[in-house]
Amino acid sequence: MDNFIFDIAAGRQISKEEALRLFETDNEDLFYAATKIRKKYKGNKVKICSIINAKSGKCAQDCKFCAQSARHKTNVSVYPFVSNEKIEEVSNKMLENAGCFGVVTSGNNLTDGEIDQFCDLLKKHKKSDHFGASIGYVSDANLKKLKEAGLKKLHHNLETSEKFFPNICSTHTYEERTDTIKRAKALGYEICSGGLFGIGESVSDRIDLAFTLKELGADSVPMNFLMPVKGTALENAKPISPLEILKTIAVFRIILQTPDIMICGGREANLRDLQSMIFYAGASGTMSGGYLTTWGRDPQSDKQMIKDLGLEIDPNR
């Protein structure tokens, strides 16, 4: 193991050129450095999050990977914003095993009426301090309204690098996404923002995304890996190999250092028998219990995996 890896394992900040070099590094050395950094900031604690698809389908945006886009012909369920009673029922169940519960909706934004409904839930729910929201673009007025109602975490993925973004979406801009994050951050929100991998991006695009998230001060970084859906523009996309996924996680940990790195959509299908290796690649959390339009792994199996690794589940957000 050369001095380059020892320096990085000690927490030295790296450049984009050095990050590229890491993708050519021996796997064991790379995972050693990522694990050292994870343990420095997270110890043996692992976070579990879960979500509800609270409004599904008929999205006017044209993201090439998304089963919920109205521009794609998929078999995804279509329904309006669900009742607060439904969200409360699902959240109470999922928060028995998770420290954070995300309310996720399709479309570029919620209506003012839907925002008001969500605020009512936040004010009344006993565990609303464990809630996050992934609701697209949010105006300053609604960001303030949600914060006053008790929302602390806003989720807003960048998906990929600014350079590659026009290849996957043309109906809104990268700047719109970063602007939403900056405005939410300025109001004191915890920011959950990450990306989707396996959509045709290069290694350089992944590195650019990691550095952008670092600059924006993301508190939590979800990493998703494409599960191609028939009927979408990326239905024939070639999957990333499990080892390349693990190396990408490790490089993100080394670049980002302190945020939680959560391994989410596509974990089961893409990593297969190597799922438990995410923590040795630097991840500090995972999503459990299912995703927006696909099933995931049951929480009990994930809890057992974490226990078998000698790690502890962090009950906090």
Image (cartoon, rainbow, N blue to C red):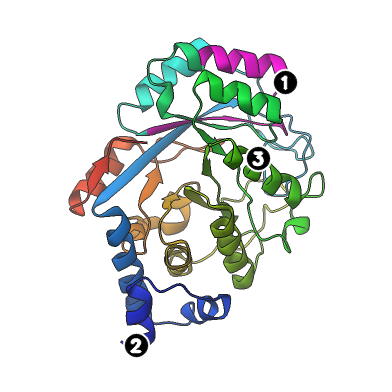
Distance between mark 1 and mark 3 Cα atoms: 19 Å
| Residue 282 rendering spot, x and y as whole percentages | 36, 61
- Looking at marks 1 and 2 on the same chain, the residue that comes earlier in the sequence is marked by 2
Instruction: Check disc 1 and give the amino acid type.
Output: Thr
Q: Which residue matches tag 2?
A: 3
Classed neighbour count for the residue bearing mark 2: other residues with Cα under 10 Å, few (<14), some (14–19), many (≥20): few
Kindly indicate the quadrant of the structure image that contains residue 145.
top right
| Residue closest to the far bottom | 2
Does the residue at mark 1 contact the one at mark 3 (Cβ under 8 Å)? no
Which residues fall within the magenta stretch? Answer: 100-121
Task: Name the mark on residue 233.
Answer: none
| Residue closest to the far right | 171
Q: Is residue 104 magenta?
A: yes
User: Where's the C terminus, which quadrant?
Assistant: top left
Kindly indicate the quadrant of the structure image that contains residue 107.
top right
Instruction: Check disc 3 and give the amino acid type.
Output: Arg
Q: Please say whether residue 83 is visible from this viewpoint.
A: no
| Residue 255 rendering spot, x and y as whole percentages | 48, 66
Q: Please say whether residue 265 is visible from this viewpoint.
A: yes
| Residue 96 rendering spot, x and y as whole percentages | 30, 26
Q: Which residue matches tag 3?
A: 183
Q: Which residue matches tag 1?
A: 111
In the image, 310 versus 177, the foreground residue is: 177
